[in-house]
Image (cartoon, helix red, strand yellow):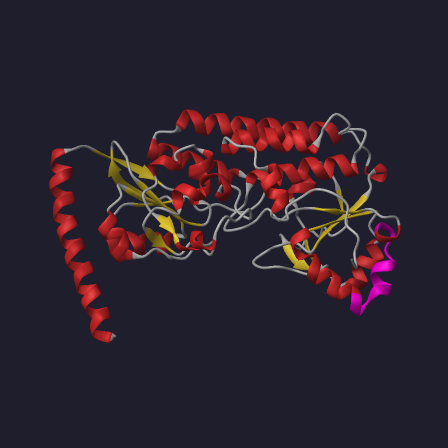
Amino acid sequence: MKFKKVLALLIAAAVVFGLSACNTQRDNEGETRIVTDVWGREVEIPVDVKTIVCLGSGAPRLAAYLDVVNMIVGSEEYLSQGVNVARDYNPVHHAKLITLPVVGAGGGSGNNNGYPEELIMLSPDVIIAGFDREPADELQAQTGIPVISVRHLTGLADESFYAAMRVFAEVVGAQERCETVLSYIDAMKEDLHSRTAGVPENEKLKAYAGAVTWNGRRGFSGTYSNFGIFEAINARNVAHSAGIPAFYEAGFESIVVWNPDVIFLDPGNMDLVNDEYRINPNFFNSLRAVKEGNVYTMPAFNSAGTNVTYAFMNAYYAGIILFPEQFADVDIAEKSAEILTMFLGMNTYDIMAQGGLYYGKLTIGE
């Protein structure tokens, strides 16, 4: 086994050497340009990029949003697990991506999870990856292929997402499509904010989002402090704490004190919540939202990065529940269809529901 591994590495090194020579010759004959990625890395790429590989957190998703999946020539290993609604682009593009050579593991850690030998053999023009700076440098050194990082933060499309989209678009020549998508996001943010901006704080329902999916599945106490979905609609998040940046485990004692009017839970984690209910039913039955039947779904929107589609759909649904008067004109199925079609070119709302990502009421303990 050791001999085979050494042999494979020697072959890969020989191919890198050969490709480097070929690339040098090609660069002498053709034109290149410099693109600066999200980390400020200046990377030399061909003027006319025709083939790409997308690896790691968010990169394949951005390709779908920019409508350039046709340029992808290599896939990630996770695709062999079948159609997965946890990543919004997967139901739309799985059939194509599963036929491509496997060149990486896939995932959202930001680490280098590409397969150097396979990438060298495939030789795309550019590798676009959701990697941190050092892993991007590492894969570029391993393969001799330009690596552009488009890593960005999870959440409701902050400035890091805009930067990643624009870097990706610059590489593949999709600037017009990029600005169309970002303008649509701007319009949604303004719409969500303007509907509730004038609602006094003391008239808002107290909301809690639990059983969230953040680096894995969580039980009832898994929640968000600075929660972009609630912030977008100016909601009153009982779990907000100035000293906590994002996800944390709230104590059951704190939740009793907060006593939210409305609770949102990830339907994919209800088995964990129901196990907790069987152990401590009195805690759950003491909560106002549970007693009054105001427990609703909030489908997971993070999987190897943020599904921006699902995040905005969640924001509109939370608005419908928490501010029924201000969102009286919004039908979640119709709004979801609009968002999904805009980003992905296809309405996958029913496919989401079939996969467990749906909108509606929940009964804890069932």
- Residue closest to the eye, 305 or 352: 352
Identify the residue shown where x is 41% and y is 43%.
150
Q: Tell whether 280 sits left or right of 151.
A: right
Q: What is the span of residues highlighted in magenta in the rendered image?
A: 278-289
Q: Is residue 332 above or below residue 2?
A: above
Q: Where is residue 183 in the image (x, y as percent from the top left)?
A: 53, 26
Q: Quadrant of the N terminus?
A: bottom left
Q: Tell whether 185 sits left or right of 208.
A: left
* Residue 164 appears in the rendering: no
- Residue closest to the eye, 335 or 80: 80
Report the number of numbered marks. Answer: 0
Q: Tell whether 241 sits left or right of 308.
A: right
Identify the residue shown where x is 30% and y is 54%.
139
Q: Does the magenta stretch include residue 366?
A: no
Q: Where is residue 73 in the image (x, y as percent from the top left)?
A: 31, 43
Q: Where is residue 123 in the image (x, y as percent from the top left)?
A: 24, 46
Q: In which quarter of the image is the C terminus?
A: bottom right
Q: Tell whether 252 sits left or right of 150.
A: right
Identify the residue shown where x is 18% and y is 54%.
16
Q: Is residue 166 above or below residue 23?
A: above
* Residue 24 appears in the rendering: yes
Q: Where is residue 97 in the image (x, y as percent from the top left)?
A: 39, 44
Which image quadrant is residue 213 in? Answer: bottom right
Question: What is the chief secondary structure element of the magenta stretch?
Answer: helix
